[in-house]
Image (cartoon, rainbow, N blue to C red):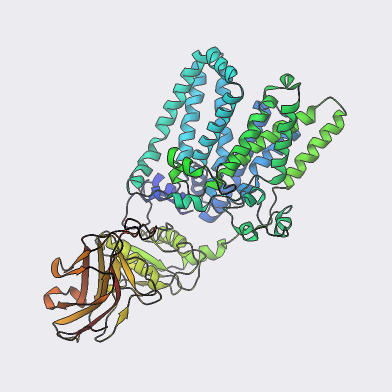
Amino acid sequence: MFLQEHWLRALLGDEPWRHPAQYFPARGSLGYYDAHFLQALVYIPLRLLGIERYLALQLQQLILTAIGFAGFWLLSRGLLRTPVPIALIGSLLFTFASSLHASTSQPQLFSIYFVPWLCLALTHGWRISTESVKRAACWWLAAGFGYALLFFTSFYIAWFVAITVAVVGFLLVLSRPAGALAVLRENGRRLWPMTLAWIVGWSIGIIPFLRTYVPVLAEGRTRSLADAMASIARKADVVNTGAGNVLWGKVLGAIPGYPVERLLQPDVYRTVTPLVLLTVLLGTICVLLDRQRRTYSTELRALPVLGATVFVLLLLPMRVFGFTVWPWIWQWIPGANAIRFAWRLQIVNAAVAAVAVTILLAWLYRRESGRPRLNAVLALVIGGVLVFEQVSRDDWAEIDRHQEIALLASIPKPPPQCHAFVMVDDVGLVRVPNSFALLAGQHVRLPAVNGLESTLYPDPRVEVIPRKTLLRSAGRWLERFGWPRGVCVLDLPRRTWDVDALSGPEALAPIIEMGMRQRLVSGADTDLLASGWSKPEDWGTWSEGPRAVLRFRVPADVQEPLTVCLEAGAFVYGTHRRQETIVSVRQREVARWGFDSHERRPESIVLSGDLFLPERLVELTFTNLTPASPKSAGLNDDPRILGLSLGWLSIADRGAPCGR
């Protein structure tokens, strides 16, 4: 909804199109998500008609469903030449596939509904190419342009479509290499101009995508292989329709040893449903075994290739007997390293299966041998069962439209000194605070620091993030940009604005009392770990990378100079035998430590008045000259670049000993 509203505001000239009002003060954050562009073309007219945003989003989904249904219907009736009842069944299988039901909370994936229209443009162009290559080339140019915009709408769907086309093409050539060459020879004169037109259309349409995502890729925002492998499917997921599936949910849950927990994970239960798979399998086998298949229509002769495609796409993102090909795909195929949930490939696979089932049922419906009327009834019964198999009882309703509209209206006007804001909700007033904050920002017309990207906030989709945790994460984000002024805090449960909570680094730095020993361990208050530190452990914490910063405040009544005491060690293991660390305050070196052992020892730093920042703020910067990873030192597979280790910190009078 936030992104759809952004496109509306961009159209009206209120916002730059590549810069939604989020992650303040970052620019180009449209590239942090799918852009939802084609879907916005449906949403924007609804909003311009005066329909409020929540209702407009629901209507958009209904209209997209109609678009998908109509596209597959026309494809079935025109290209596949199927009877009306079978076209209806195929369109329902495509539009309401179980894998799409599992995608309800990721509406960008419903851009699969545009794919039949791209196919219609290509097939229509091919049909009229014998009459006019120029007109055919125009249709192919439009198809290429539309496919490029599909990337700008949902990269997953566009990329999965490319993989699917590659698999189908490979299997076609493999099954009939001579036929493929013959097609090229016979149609080369009209095919090459049309292909060139498609490439031109795609090249023009891909420009917004490149302008949006290339800068983000330059920031290093790609998915790791570990991310992708975490979503690889198991053998049990071949039939995983989710716990809510009317036909299979309870049956799967009752199977001894079946991993029931996976029935509750939407990114896992996206499979092509079992009876659809069985139908495709049996139909493919029957066509292959039939000696009369040369008399079949072109569509029916293509069924084995479509059936094989369904099972190839099923196996690509799956681990079978401990083996998966996805690491090779991730490494060698362009764009694969942007895919985190590889099993979503089944959304496109379900569309391929719907085409295969439509062809098979149309053949059975028309079959004259045996009992024609019985064949037609059997085709309709099978189709009805397959459609029923897609039905699920899962309830995705998580937002009360009237409550959220009232909540937005209750947010008071921000103070004039606020130029951006962070929203906190420490009681769970809204479903996902970081996403609601974006709508709140559009409502009060201020950019939000909040966002829904895990590189900025820890666990951004949880329902309750403590105020302190959120502000600490926001402060670290703002620090990257020199801590811009005018960032306020909106306390949503209390409907109040705080203009000082994020006024600068001193606002978040903890006060260390004289004689107080602050342990830097997991579960402790570690707000003084400003940047460059790994997650605290039971003994303390490691610095990660060449530079780390501690930040804290000293009480106003503490006399100067004073001593800062730290329990410090370093990563010195295996082949990595020495570590040197420079300690600086306000860019002035105040200590240099050398470590020949990983054992921690007390170290001290003397601070005087000229080393303090305003508000009695102290920033200790540790520069590790030779950090190394445990992996490079031959200790284990930990890739973190480690330097200093700290156990605790305290302050004392100058000259006081820093004991253990």
Q: Is residue 590 left or right of residue 319?
A: left
Residue in the picture at 42% in, 64% down: 458
Q: Quadrant of residue 498?
A: bottom left
Residue 525: x and y in percent read 36, 77
In this rendering, position of residue 126 left or right of residue 653: right
Residue 202 horizontal/vertical position (percent): 44, 30
- Across and down, in percent, residue 44 comes to 49, 46
Is residue 40 left or right of 242 when viewed as pictured?
left
Q: Is residue 161 visible?
A: yes
Total marks placed: 0
Task: Determine whether, in the image, residue 135 is placed left or right of residue 30.
Answer: right
- Residue for point 70% across, 26% down: 300
Q: Tell me the quarter of the picture where residue 481 sits.
A: bottom left
Q: Closest to the observer: 327 or 414?
A: 327
Most foreground residue, 579 or 336: 579
Q: Which quadrant of the figure contains the C terminus?
A: bottom left
Q: Quadrant of residue 208?
A: top left
Give coordinates of residue 310: x percent, y percent. 63, 37
Can residue 418 be seen here? The reply is: no
Outermost residue to the right: 371
Q: Give the vertical position of 425 relative to 342 (above or below).
A: below
Question: Where is 128 relative to 313, above or below?
Answer: above
